[in-house]
Image: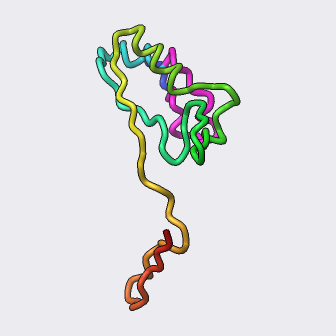
Amino acid sequence: MDDGTDPLGADEPARDRRRLDPARLAGQLADMQANVVLMGMGGICAYYPTRVEFHYASPHLPAGRDMFGDFVREAHARRIRVVGRYDLSKPRSRSTTPARSGSSARPTVRP
């Protein structure tokens, strides 16, 4: 089922990833006889609806869309296990960015 296109849209901007087709991606994985897949599900932002305080759904996720859940259902229907990767890192801000090489200044770290 290789038609030469990338179901994740890796060659397109992140905002276009909302077009992910979970059934197509799961079908392609099944065609490759995959039995497990690692997929990002959240961290700095979630790829599923969330009500957790200070944890926000991706701004590129259409309202009400559960991209991760949709994919899990399609993968499980094909007997493919899904490992959800949750990124615990946080974005760097100017206050935590290390000083440039050769500088004796230390980065300022704020809680």
Q: Is residue 100 left or right of residue 47?
A: left
Q: Nearer the viewer, residue 31 or 38?
A: 38
Q: Residue at 50% x, 29% y: name it.
A: 6
Tell me which corner region of the image, top left, top right, bottom left or bottom right, holds residue 20: top right
Instruction: Evaluate whether residue 1 shows in this view.
Output: no
Q: Residue at 41% x, 49% y: name it.
A: 88
Give, as a single range, the part of the protein colored magenta: 5-24
Instruction: Evaluate whether residue 110 shows in this view.
Output: yes
Q: Nearer the viewer, residue 19 or 31?
A: 19
Q: How many marks can you see?
A: 0
Task: Name, please, the residue furthest toward the front.
Answer: 53
- Residue 4, above or below 74: below
Asked whether 21 falls inside the magenta stretch, the response is: yes
Q: Residue at 43% x, 89% y: name it.
A: 105
- Residue 26, above or below 84: above
Give how far across and how far down residue 79 sits, in percent: 34, 10
Q: Is residue 58 left or right of residue 24?
A: right
Give how far across and how far down residue 53 sits, in percent: 59, 44
Q: Nearer the viewer, residue 19 or 76?
A: 76
Task: Name, please, the residue furthest toward the top.
Answer: 77
Give how far across and how far down residue 32 sits, in percent: 32, 17
Task: Name, please, the residue furthest toward the right.
Answer: 63
Q: Is residue 30 left or right of residue 11?
A: left
- Residue 97, above or below 38: below
